[in-house]
Image (cartoon, grey):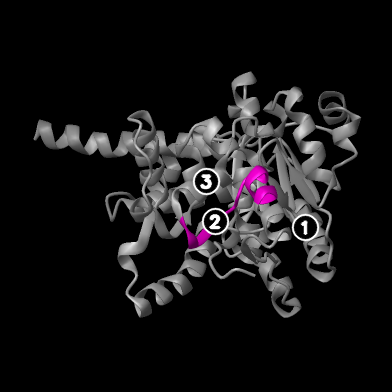
Amino acid sequence: MDELIRKYKIIVGSKGFFENQVKLLDEHIAQNDLDDQIGNFLELVRLSDEKKTRGISFEEDDKAAIMLVKNNDYLGITESANDRLGSLIEEITSDDAIIYIHNPPKTLATYLKDLHSREEISLSYEKEEYDIKRESSTFLDNMSQIKTAILGQDEAVNEISKSMWHITAVNRKKPYIIMLYGGSSLGKSELVREISKKFFEGKFVEKHLSMFKNDAYSNYFFGDRPNRKSLGFDLLERESNLIFLDEFDKCPEYFYSAFYTLFDNTNFADATYEVDISGLLVILTSNYQNIDEMKKHVGLPIFYRIDKFIHFKQFDERTIYGITMNEIRHHVDECGGKLVEDEVYRRVSPRICAVGENARTIKNKVQEVVEDILFEEVQEADCN
């Protein structure tokens, strides 16, 4: 094979993983004093376009011997440039360039595979591996801590404990889908965050589906615009295998077809990207009150793709009291001696109902009382 060939390295994973791989290239650059040969992809694309407009050829001295093509670079060029990304890279790099490519779109990945099959380039891969914390010795303690943090939802935590034990005990490839459902502000989102802390080093992808209200967002789900972020783009860039899709009940149903692929397969593909999603844990939240309501609104094709349904019940009086006191203590600590816990409770307790409260309503009522007390101090000082 001719030695004057481009050497491509495809790096699939998060930005942190890409940067760690580039450190090896940095060592090579430092050892060989090659700093002046590193090209900025977007700057060179702009320079190439400018010269073409002026009828000037792109000289060999303009080309980069070392190139980093970061995934955000795809967002900085036109759709037509994305369509010819492989040849565009060739135009701005030398014949024996070293090129690191982060999360390439399908068109570029296919182009490079074809060149490699014909031995026209050197091509290697590095792929980030994702896993869940599997230490059985700490599992029960972790779930016990989660139960302490999520007040009033012991049954829900018990149910997700069974699922988490199953996921950590087996080597499941197909994504596991959990639906947390029930009223607003009962601890569903908090449970997802606790799961991320104990099992995924606090890392997860979070999407609020209530934001996706019209056709303008279809490009995100289906990846129709190669120079725009998409679900596939974000999945490639993920730092863990935990995906949190909040407010699933508020997502328009014409986006559901994207979830069929996400829930059913070990590979997710949109129009621009293809992603290995083996071992993914997807947690959905919704405000549906019961299973029948959920079936009616999401439809059976989506419903039967969900592995487990966990209900969050309304808070009882004991839970409401516990959340109230936690909120009061938070404000007392925050205000550094300006508040007295018993006084705040005395004034807020008549405003809080024994049933029907949630974390948000309690928080708002405690906040109102705290503001009243602090403002009264200002008024008294002014009068004196």
- Quadrant location of residue 145? bottom right
Q: CA distance from mark 3 to mark 1?
A: 41 Å
Q: Considering the numbered disc 3 on the image, is that residue within a helix, a strand or a loop?
A: helix
Q: Which quadrant of the figure contains the N terminus?
A: bottom right
What residue did someone put label 3 on?
324
Residue 95 locus on image (x, y percent) = 50, 59
Q: Considering the numbered disc 2 on the image, is that residue within a helix, a strand or a loop?
A: strand
What residue did someone put label 1 on?
278
Instruction: Tell me if residue 19 is in the magenta stretch.
Output: no
Height in image: 368 above or below 252?
A: below
Residue 256 locus on image (x, y percent) = 77, 30
Q: N-terminal of the two: label 2 or label 3? A: 2
Q: Amino acid at mark 2?
A: Ile
State the residue at coordinates (49%, 52%): 70
Mark 2: few/some/many CA within 10 Å (<14, 14-19, 20+): many
Q: N-terminal of the two: label 2 or label 1? A: 2
Q: Considering the numbered disc 1 on the image, is that residue within a helix, a strand or a loop?
A: loop
Task: Tell whether label 1 touches label 2 (CB within 8 Å).
Answer: no
Q: Amino acid at mark 1?
A: Ser
Residue 101: image tag: 2
Residue 141 locus on image (x, y percent) = 68, 73
Task: Tell whether label 1 touches label 3 (CB within 8 Å).
Answer: no
Q: N-terminal of the two: label 3 or label 1? A: 1
Name the one closer to the observer, 9 or 308: 9
Name the one closer to the observer, 67 or 144: 67
Height in image: 205 above or below 288?
A: below
Magenta stretch: give its range. Answer: 94-111
Instruction: Tell me if residue 105 is in the magenta stretch.
Output: yes
State the residue at coordinates (56%, 45%): 87
